[in-house]
Amino acid sequence: MSELPKTTHGEHAPAARSAQTVNDELLSSMRPPTLRWYALVIFLLALIGWGLFAFGWQVSHGMYVTGKNRPVMWGFYITGFVFWVGLSHSGTMVSSILRLSRANWRRPILRAAEAMTVFCIMVAGLFPLIHLGRNWIFFYMMPYPNQRGLWPNFRSPLLWDMTAITAYIIGSSLFLYLGMLPDLALVRDRSTGWRRDVYGLLAMGWRGSAHEWAVYHKASTLMAALIIPVAVSVHSIVAWDFAVTVVPGWHSTIFPPYFVIGAIFSGVAAVITLMIIIRRTFHLQEYLTAQHFDNMGKLLLVISLLWSYAYFVEVQTTWYAHEPIEWEVFSFMSDRYTWPLAVMLIGNSILPITLLCFRRMRRSIPVLLVLTLLINVAMFIERFLIIVPSLSHKNMPFAWGSYSPSWVEISVNVMALALFALLYTLFAKFFPIVAVTDVRELEARRGQVALGRASLPSLPVED
Amino acid sequence: MEKMTSPYRWGMAIDLDRCTGCGACVVACQAENNVGLCDKKEIAEGRNMHWLRIERYWVGEYPDVRVRFLPVLCQHCHDAPCEPVCPVYASYHNPDGLNGQVYNRCVGTRYCGNNCPYAVRVFNFYPHEWPQPLDSQLNPDITVRSRGVMEKCSFCIQRIRRAKETARGEGRQVADGEVQPACAQTCPADAFVFGNLADPLSRVARLSRSPRRFQLLEHLGTHPSVFYLKGGGREHV
């Protein structure tokens, strides 16, 4: 996690550009939308419309339109929930941990990662509401004075979920917004008309005085430190949904750390995917260099090793204890879902660990694109394989069953993906998707100033 | 055990040596409790609504094959896995030691159903209807549940309530055998015995101390209120 090498790699030429060019290039995503942009938005809206129709179908008909049944009462919805909560851990990992460890290479990608956190957790928060049998009285789960004279049950992990997710949505939105303040001011200064008023309002009167910068730096470091425990607790709590039950295969003490590792794994993979897309769409090859992908690849390799270890420990304890019903669940899972299991192991362990060991692979954009997409498919499968096989073969053999998702559940999951993509597309159009001030700060630090006849770095390098 | 606030702790003993697997209890339960009518499709999908099921197991190798019947209903656990996970207290523990289920509170997270190791909680996946003239036999003492709601055996709580009211009116406690759930009342082999476990002399309390007693999934520590009785000997395969 160190300073980017300055001149050793030819692809990066520092401080050659004027501030104006840098601003222009980094804010290129906010130029007036093209026809292709509109086409994309309409396509995403159509997918969301279809998903809403499917959800409406479920609300008006009943839960029988899903694939759920007596033993398997949770399915694709809760899989989607855990998956999206997992993805939302990207921003925290990439942005706050790298900010605290002063890894300067994080700068061009931190905004993309933070925005991803906010939108992923928003999408995730929809699933617990969608999966209810009586969605129209979802507010029974909220603590408010009501005519039933009843407070919600805070012993229920679902209430912990709701508390944690609300806290995370608020925290990560603040984190995103705080980091964006100087950039919003920059956009305000560059825009005209009513846009200027809107961005002016959003920038909250930022003028860029020395005092403001000092407060800003203090606040963002503090925020970065505060958001980490929230993020870790969110996915631990999601893991407790399963770990505190008596369902064989769920009742496992390793679940909280295992889920957090899995969350960071899928989150970092998704950040790399997004980096590739943003780099290509907005022509940011100058700012997102092979060095960034190399570093992210190393991070991914470490987390993949951690995930593999956690998964191995989980299976190993099941195998060693050989508790009949737990073993039955594992046998059923590997028997009925052999192919998904194979995809999961290849996508989460075997391929990442072998490929990412090589520098050339870490620096190859197509390899990383395929790999990170595969990792997230594998992580979705992983969540599915945790939830469904355990429920299918619970303690009473007479009541065993199985599950396959219906078109409604698949449509709603596709809607979630489309909703995330739409929120992200809109965000990238209306807000600076690359943290301009952070990048320029780095450029300034790297710049040379003339002092007499000597040329010295403008600021001492931090680490 | 928590402090007792009620003189009752309802429990049941099911004598498996008596059970013939006839299924009369299943029908009685369905009629008493307004349990939804399921067609073939619903049952094939694993969405049947039976509060009480007869599990059938084949034991032994041909030609010495025996069939075992196990009536399974809500075990009314004293440390019930379904209760703490419900976010809205639809599943709760009442002072008589019963697992209550308040249909009007239920939002349908189905978490209780997942966490029930006995898989006795049934969910209204379908909206259920009672075509003419079946609607005339709906029990007026019980709510008809809407779709999206979890339900399960209540030990015929409406009968317990009525017996308690009668007893209170006469200034006494409910006598042993005075109240019976529909399954116990119907069983032709008299395999079900229902009563007050808090009264050590009641029939069910005496049976619960029988050497033949066992409980389902005892190792999970759920402390069920249902005791099963099963003899040894050749039957004990």
Image (cartoon, rainbow, N blue to C red):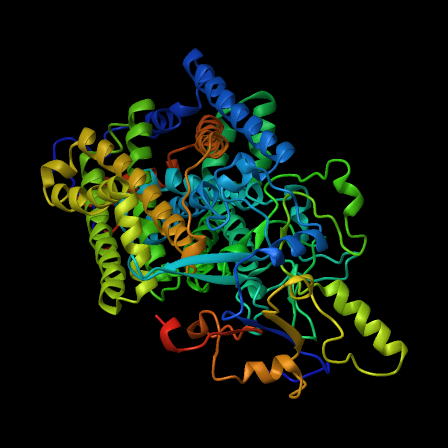
Residue drawn where x is 44% and y is 11% of the image:
A35
Q: Is residue B5 above or below residue B153?
A: below
Q: Position of residue B122 (x, y in %)?
A: 58, 52
The one nearer the camera, A140 or A356, is A140
The residue positioned farthest toward the bottom in the image shown: B200
> Is residue A239 something one can see in this rendering?
no
Q: Is residue B85 above or below residue A183?
A: below
Residue drawn where x is 44% and y is 61% of the image:
A240
Q: Position of residue B127 (x, y in %)?
A: 66, 39
Q: Position of residue A102 (x, y in %)?
A: 29, 53
Drawn side of residue B75 relative to residue A93, left or right: right
Drawn side of residue A343 relative to residue A86, left or right: left
The residue positioned farthest toward the right in the image shown: B169
Tell me the quadrant of the picture where the C terminus of chain A can be found. Answer: bottom left
The one nearer the camera, B8 or B192, is B192
Q: Position of residue A112 (x, y in %)?
A: 38, 37
Residue drawn where x is 55% and y is 29% of the image:
A54
Q: Quadrant of residue A218?
A: bottom left
The residue positioned farthest toward the top in the image shown: A35
Q: Is residue A258 above or below residue A35?
A: below
Q: Quadrant of residue A243?
A: bottom left
> Is residue B42 something one can see in this rendering?
yes
Residue drawn where x is 55% and y is 39% of the image:
B42
Q: How many marks?
A: 0
The one nearer the camera, A427 or B134, is B134
Drawn side of residue A262 relative to residue A180, left or right: left
